[in-house]
Amino acid sequence: QVQLVESGGGLVQPGGSLILSCAASGITFSIYDMGWYRLAPGNQREQVATITRTGLRNYVDSVKGRFTISRDNAKNKVYLQMNSLKPEDTAVYYCNGQLGSVAYWGQGTQVTVSS
């Protein structure tokens, strides 16, 4: 059974930081491209950051310089370090694992940026 389990969300003040983690099981983690997506009320799902199985990273423009995606293949985990958080970063963040046309999703973790 494939599972992607996110953790690390919460409430943070503007300018603060959070680290999201996603633990994967049931897949050969190292061959999957991994990513973080977010969904805010009234918006479409947005790709935030991705990291390929070879370690290539890509970010949406709005988070460049503030967010960092990383992976630890030994622990089957992917991370999203989020710094200088803004209220517009408020959303449910989802972990994604992709191998060709096969995609798996986590249940999501809420990130709220508010004073």
Image (tube, grey):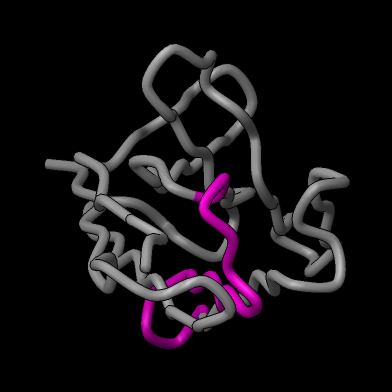
Instruction: Reply yes or no: does residue 36 show up in magenta.
Output: no
Q: Residue at coordinates 48% horizontally, 69% vertically from top-left?
A: 78
**Residue 87, x across and y down, in percent:** 51, 53
**Within the image, what quadrant is residue 108 found in?**
top left
Q: Is residue 12 left or right of residue 63?
A: left
**Residue 46, x across and y down, in percent:** 61, 28
Instruction: Give the residues in magenta.
Output: 73-89
Q: Which residue, as the protein is rendered here, is positioned at the far left? A: 1
Q: Is residue 41 left or right of residue 26?
A: right
Q: Is residue 108 left or right of residue 59?
A: left
Instruction: Reply yes or no: does residue 88 show up in magenta.
Output: yes
Residue 101 vs 12, above or below: the answer is above
For the residue pair 66 and 1, the one nearer the viewer reads as 66
Residue 35 vs 23, above or below: the answer is above
Count every numbered label the image shows and give the total. 0
**Residue 53, x across and y down, in percent:** 70, 60
For the residue pair 109 and 43, the one nearer the viewer reads as 43
Q: Which quadrant is home to the N terminus?
A: top left
For the residue pair 83 and 48, the one nearer the viewer reads as 83
For the residue pair 108 and 31, the one nearer the viewer reads as 108
Q: Residue at coordinates 40% horizontally, 41% vertically from top-left?
A: 91
Q: Residue at coordinates 45% horizontally, 27% vertically from top-left?
A: 103
**Residue 89, x across and y down, in percent:** 54, 50
Q: Residue at coordinates 42% horizontally, 57% vertically from top-left?
A: 28
**Within the image, what quadrant is residue 13 found in?**
bottom left
Residue 102 vs 65, above or below: the answer is above
